[in-house]
Amino acid sequence: MANTKAGGKKQKQTLLEKLGSEEAVKAYYRKIGAMGGAKSRGGGFGSDKVGKDGLTGHERARLAGMKGGRASRLPSNITDHQKKQIHNLLAGGKSE
């Protein structure tokens, strides 16, 4: 029943029985959420840190989306090799 409404209700009921009150259940979820947040390494597209490439996560996500959008709009009569060449040119690389 994982990831279903019924499973969530069953989990809540189990926690209420184990912990005794609604406040204790909220504190439990607050505790495990804080543990996950403390364990986070701060990477990914949500990061404000400047990476080795000189970009923040937001800027990196924007550029990745631009590349993907351009590649997906290429006409279908172009071969995969030609698509890679165009993608490399748009990314600032050299054509092969």
Image (cartoon, rainbow, N blue to C red):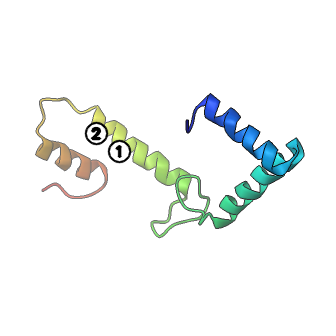
Residue farthest toward the front in the current orientation of the protein: 17
Instruction: Kindly indicate the quadrant of the structure image that contains residue 8.
Output: top right
**Mark 1 near mark 2, Cβ–Cβ under 8 Å?**
yes
Label 1 packing within 10 angstroms: few (<14), some (14-19), many (20+): some
- Tell me if mark 2 has few (under 14), some (14-19) or many (20+) residues whose alpha carbon lies within 10 angstroms of its own: some
SS under mark 1 = helix
- From this view, report whether residue 94 is shown above or below residue 52: above
Helix, strand or loop at disc 2?
Answer: helix
Q: Is residue 55 left or right of residue 93?
A: right
Amino acid at circle 2: Ala
Q: Position of residue 42 (x, y in %)?
A: 60, 63
Q: Residue at x 78, y 53 (%)?
A: 28
Distance from the alpha carbon under mark 1 to that under mark 2: 6 Å
Q: Mark 1 points at which residue?
A: 67
- Give percent across and percent down for residue 26: 82, 47
The number of callouts visible is 2
Image location of residue 56, percent across then percent down: 55, 59
The percent position of residue 24, horizontal first and vertical second, equals: 86, 50
Position of the N terminus, as image quadrant, is top right
Nearer-the-camera pick, 75 or 31: 31
- Residue sitting at 88 percent across and 46 percent down? 23
Residue pointed to by mark 2: 71
The quadrant in which the C terminus is found is bottom left
**What residue is rendered at 20% in x and 58% in y?**
94
- Find residue 40 and name its label: none
